[in-house]
Image (cartoon, helix red, strand yellow):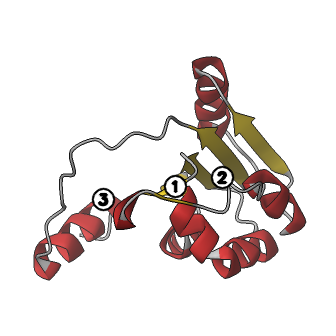
């Protein structure tokens, strides 16, 4: 979320979508608070919530225990919050994210399964170059 915030501020001419999971968002609540204070109009955050920490072995996350990420987002000052449970809601969020004039937050409920993992490249130069190219810096 913090990289997305920085990118949204640096490139206010472009919409920025952050896609993350419930575990990462729970671990970075300070980041969500900072987004809520800054509120760049071109930033949308989509949190895929399966109620588990998928990267560390599928332990139940706090959202499985009742923590409401949409409630946290509202408490952090984000005014436009979605709680998505179906494809129709996802399509609506996608449409709003393309033409938003305020920070958006969406919690997207997904099924907790354990698909095969595909680990991303760990080559720092490759990752830096790919990010810079996507950001329009190079």
Q: Quadrant of residue 132?
A: bottom left
Secondary element at tag 3: helix
For the point 66% across and 46% down, the residue is 107
Please name which of the two marks, 1 or 3, marks the residue nearer to the observer.
1
Disc sitting over residue 52 in the figure: 1
Q: Locate the C terminus by quadrant.
A: bottom left
| Residue situated in front as seen by the camera: 91 or 6 | 91
Above or below, 122 against 104 in this view is below
Secondary element at tag 1: strand
For the point 81% across and 47% down, the residue is 80
In whole angstroms, how far apart are the C-alphas of marks 1 and 2?
Answer: 7 Å
Badge 2: residue crowd in 10 Å (few <14, some 14–19, many ≥20): some
Residue 117 coordinates in the image, percent (x, y): 22, 51
| Residue situated in front as seen by the camera: 8 or 79 | 79
For the point 74% across and 38% down, the residue is 83
| Residue situated in front as seen by the camera: 69 or 123 | 69
For the point 65% across and 33% down, the residue is 93
Q: Mark 3 — residue?
A: 134
Residue 78 visible to the viewer: no
Q: Mark 2 — residue?
A: 64
Residue 119 coordinates in the image, percent (x, y): 18, 60
Secondary element at tag 2: loop
In whole angstroms, how far apart are the C-alphas of marks 2 and 3?
Answer: 34 Å
């Amino acid at each position: 979320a913090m990289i997305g915030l920085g990118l949204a501020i640096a490139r206010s001419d472009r919409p920025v979508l952050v896609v993350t999971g419930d575990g990462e968002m729970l671990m970075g609540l300070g980041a969500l608070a900072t987004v809520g204070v800054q509120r760049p109009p071109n930033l949308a955050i989509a949190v895929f919530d399966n109620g588990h920490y998928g990267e560390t072995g599928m332990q139940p996350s706090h959202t499985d225990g009742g923590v409401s990420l949409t409630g946290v987002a509202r408490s952090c000052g984000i005014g436009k919050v979605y709680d998505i449970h179906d494809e129709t809601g996802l399509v609506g969020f996608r449409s709003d994210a393309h033409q938003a004039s305020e920070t958006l937050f969406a919690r997207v409920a997904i099924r907790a399964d354990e698909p095969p993992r595909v680990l991303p490249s760990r080559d720092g130069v490759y990752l830096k170059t790919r990010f810079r190219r996507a950001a329009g810096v190079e």
